[in-house]
Image (cartoon, rainbow, N blue to C red):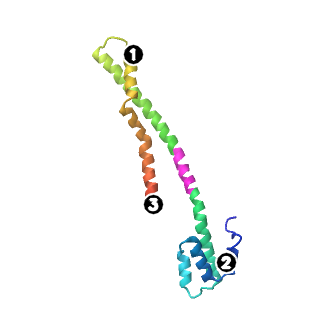
Amino acid sequence: MGNSPKKGSDQSAARMPAAQYLDKMASVSGERFPLAEAASRSEAREAPQVAEACTHAYHRKEVAGWERGFDMIALLRLLIPLLVVLTLIYIGLSVYSRRRRREKLIARWQSNRLTGDQDVFVRRGLAKYDRSFRRKLILGVYIVPLGLIAILVYYTNFT
């Protein structure tokens, strides 16, 4: 597995002159590697070390696509604990905000000396609060950090 050469055409690369191998690499990958270009300009084009170095560069290029999966795993290792922490913060903010709203409704009931059932007044006020935009703003606890991470990942990888 790991660094062992593949069966087939890459085993014949050790027997193939370096210049032919470089041309083969360029036709398969669609691009030239800096090491391959440097080797093609060198005087020792047929040296076995050059072919071996190019083979390793080619395998690193193939493995790089496979290793991108590990980048996603690293991102998940960041995001899962982050989502747990953000969920705890969201629950804490929601409970705190609802409690503050309840206290304000009770204070309004007492200061205005309203008639009727205080519990019904508080329940109706909390029902209005649950549908309010202010309550939905607490979701910014998720949106802001995850949005910043998405922007950083995009900026790091695609610019």
Dividing the picture into quadrants, the one containing residue 110 is top left
Q: In front of the other: label 2 or label 1?
A: 2
- In the figure, 142 relative to 57: above or below? above
Query: Which residue is found at the position 54% from the left and 72% from the top?
Result: 30
Q: Which residue is mark 3?
A: 158
Query: Mark 2 or mark 1, which has the lower sequence index?
Result: 2
Q: Position of residue 66 (x, y in %)?
A: 60, 61
Q: Quadrant of residue 48?
A: bottom right
Q: CA distance from mark 2 to mark 3?
A: 34 Å
Q: Which residue is mark 2?
A: 13
- Residue 77 counted in the magenta span: yes
Q: Amino acid at mark 1?
A: Val
Q: Quadrant of the C terminus?
A: bottom left
Mark 1 Cα shell of 10 Å, populated few (<14), some (14-19), many (≥20): few
Do the CB atoms of the residues marked 2 and 3 lie less than 8 Å apart? no
* Extreme-top residue of the structure: 116
Nearer-N-terminus badge (3/1) = 1
Label 3 sits on what residue type?
Phe
Position of residue 54 measured from the top left corner of the image (x, y, whole percent):
60, 76
Say whether residue 105 is left or right of residue 74: left
The circle on residue 120 is 1
